[in-house]
Image: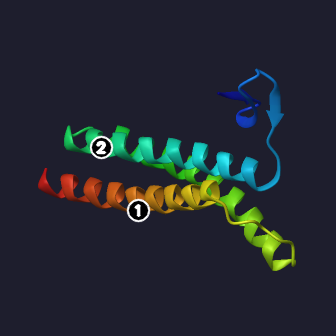
Amino acid sequence: MLSEMSGSFKCRKNEKERFIFMEGTELVAFNIIASVGTARSSYIAAIDEAAAGNYEEAEKLIKEGQEAFNGGHEAHQELLVKMANGEKVEMTLLLTHAEDQLMSAETFGIIAEKMLALYKGLK
């Protein structure tokens, strides 16, 4: 079970209800997943709003998605900087999942912008 503190995941409870604090790559991966998950949801909502003809709301949601995505991108960039500085970054299934979610959200952002333009053109 995950607990949220200050907007980013900080700890979880194990089966004995003791808190295990996340740090390093695990914490960064959870921050990426949380940020880009929010972004992807905003992008999907923007597509729905564009389909309904609510173009201003769609644009607002795309902007919100971009802001959330940037949080995930910045967290990912932290890991790239560590690697560039010679620090070891362990590639785990969790980090692989985070990177997959990052790419998925980026794709949804591009699609949302294209769909908004398409729906506006059909008007």
Neighbour class for label 2 at 10 Å: few (<14), some, many (≥20)?
some
What residue is shown at x 33% (from left), y 59% (from top)? 111
Which residue appears farthest toward the top when viewing the image? 17
Q: Tag 1 or tag 2, which sits nearer the N-term?
A: 2
Dot 1 lies on which element?
helix
* 65 or 15, nearer to the observer: 15
In percent of width and height, residue 78 lies at 77, 63
What residue is shown at x 21% (from left), y 53% (from top)? 120
* 61 or 96, nearer to the observer: 96
Name the residue type under label 1: Thr
Is 69 on the left or on the right of 21, as rendered?
left
Above/below status of 34 relative to 25: above
Per the model, the C-alpha gap separating discs 2 and 1 is 20 Å
Above/below status of 20 relative to 30: above
Q: Nearer the viewer, mark 2 or mark 1?
A: 1
What residue is shown at x 13% (from left), y 50% (from top)? 123
Above/below status of 57 relative to 5: below
Residue 107, which numbered label?
Answer: 1
Name the residue type under label 2: Tyr
Which residue appears farthest toward the front when viewing the image? 16
* 15 or 45, nearer to the observer: 15
Above/below status of 117 relative to 39: below
In percent of width and height, residue 61 lies at 43, 42
Neighbour class for label 1 at 10 Å: few (<14), some, many (≥20)?
few
Name the residue carrying label 2. Answer: 55
* 20 or 104, nearer to the observer: 20
Q: Quadrant of residue 34?
A: top right
